[in-house]
Image (cartoon, grey):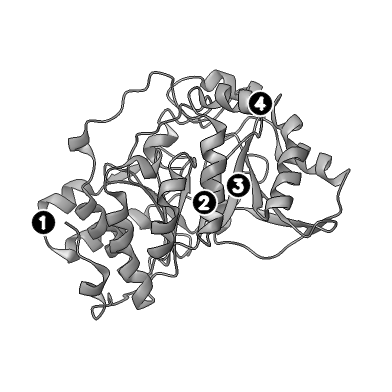
């Protein structure tokens, strides 16, 4: 069992020299995949018959606690829990409760998650009690039939119920929608109008060349966000915003509704120069760039020594090797910089 927040309330982690890469970027944001399992099989994310990792290869909740606490001690202030679908992991709320102690000490400023929303209705109140204040929900369409086709086995109604439960629990909800040619053009205004009515922020994400199969289809599905933004400007007045949520999204405000709409465009508008985030997989591999294959295996260090100094040294060495940027590119008519690993393993 993980220890409760009360057991740690008087033991705030000492913050040492911040994590800084070779390009003087301070790493403040850790995205942690707690499982590669998911109850959906989204066409752009996972193979239909995906092979999940043996459970023994996944980090235990205690190991995830130790690793995340090490990062918080090194200056990480934002922790996002991802998957797969994080809420399908057994006893995952114990991990959220354990991480909430870092919110109590002030070392961690934000604890949040990205979810497909399928399990959100039964967990929303408990997440709020752990100090989670906002969640990102992946939702590409409000059409039930298209939703079933995109997710292969998901249903729209439970996701909408989960979003409603999150709102009732006091959580802010941001909707993430992947831009897909042949789909998002039809979904743009229904999603914008629905989010305005429900009070949700909305962010569109460009499709990246990642996954175990279907890479060759990515260029046919790729829709530059400049196209969606141009369509949006035909109906609304777009006011650029300087504010950020700590991630790569760039926001505009729709003057007519007052709502925020974000754009994450790793291909058409790289944001690598300001990247402050790294990803930890459910097996303990640390990826310092989503668009590069190089990773540092922290699990052997974690299991091989109880020495906190050794773990810190391994983390700092990995951060020092963080590359300048990714190699994603569709400009020459074929996906370049493609990553064979799936997002469910790396973390969304």
Residue beneath disc 4: 332
- Residue 165 has which mark? 2
Distance, label 2 to label 4, CA atoms, is 45 Å
Disc 3 crowd, CA 10 A, few/some/many (<14, 14-19, 20+):
many
Name the front one of labels 2 and 4. Answer: 2
SS of the residue under disc 4: loop
The foreground one among 160 and 260 is 160
Mark found first going from the N terminus, 4 or 3: 3
**Percent of width and height locating residue 328:** 56, 36
Mark found first going from the N terminus, 2 or 4: 2
The foreground one among 103 and 341 is 103
Which residue shows up at 27% across the image and 43% down it? 90
Which residue shows up at 43% across the image and 57% down it? 125
Disc 1 crowd, CA 10 A, few/some/many (<14, 14-19, 20+):
few
Position of 16 compared to 224: left or right? left
Residue beneath disc 3: 175
Name the front one of labels 4 and 3. Answer: 3
Distance, label 4 to label 3, CA atoms, is 31 Å
Residue 264 visible from this viewpoint: no
**Percent of width and height locating residue 265:** 64, 44
Position of 111 compared to 243: left or right? left
The foreground one among 60 and 265 is 60
Residue beneath disc 1: 305
Residue 2 visible from this viewpoint: yes
Mark found first going from the N terminus, 2 or 1: 2
Which residue shows up at 42% across the image and 24% down it? 212
């Amino acid at each position: 069992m993980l220890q409760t927040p009360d057991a740690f309330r008087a033991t705030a982690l000492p913050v040492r020299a911040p994590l800084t890469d070779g390009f003087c970027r301070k790493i403040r944001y850790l995205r942690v995949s707690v499982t590669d399992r998911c109850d959906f099989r989204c066409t752009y994310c996972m193979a239909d018959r995906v092979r999940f990792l043996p459970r023994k290869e996944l980090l235990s909740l205690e190991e995830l606690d130790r690793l995340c606490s090490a990062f918080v001690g090194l200056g990480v202030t934002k922790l996002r829990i991802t998957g797969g679908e994080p809420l399908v992991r057994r006893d995952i709320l114990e991990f959220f409760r354990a991480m909430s102690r870092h919110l109590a000490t002030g070392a961690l400023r934000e604890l949040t998650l990205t979810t497909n929303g399928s399990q959100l209705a039964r967990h929303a109140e408990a997440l709020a009690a752990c100090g989670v204040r906002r969640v990102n929900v992946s939702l590409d369409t409000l059409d039930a039939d298209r939703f079933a086709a995109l997710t292969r086995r998901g249903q729209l109604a439970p996701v909408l119920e989960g979003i409603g439960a999150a709102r009732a629990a006091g959580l802010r909800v941001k909707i993430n929608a992947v831009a897909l040619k042949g789909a998002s053009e039809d979904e743009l205004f229904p999603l914008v109008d629905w989010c305005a009515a429900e009070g949700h922020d909305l962010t569109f994400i460009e499709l990246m060349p990642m996954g175990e199969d279907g890479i060759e289809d990515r260029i046919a599905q790729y829709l530059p966000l400049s196209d969606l933004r141009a369509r949006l400007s035909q109906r609304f007045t777009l006011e650029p915003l300087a504010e950020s949520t700590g991630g790569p999204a760039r926001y505009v405000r729709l003057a007519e509704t007052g709502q925020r709409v974000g754009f994450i465009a790793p291909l058409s508008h790289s944001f690598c120069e300001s990247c402050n985030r790294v990803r930890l997989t459910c097996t303990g591999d640390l990826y310092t760039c989503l668009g590069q294959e190089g990773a540092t295996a922290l699990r052997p260090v974690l299991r091989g020594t109880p020495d906190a100094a050794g773990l810190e040294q391994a983390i700092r060495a990995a951060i020092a090797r963080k590359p300048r940027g990714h190699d994603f590119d569709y400009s020459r008519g074929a996906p370049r910089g493609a990553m064979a690993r799936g997002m469910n393993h790396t973390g969304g």
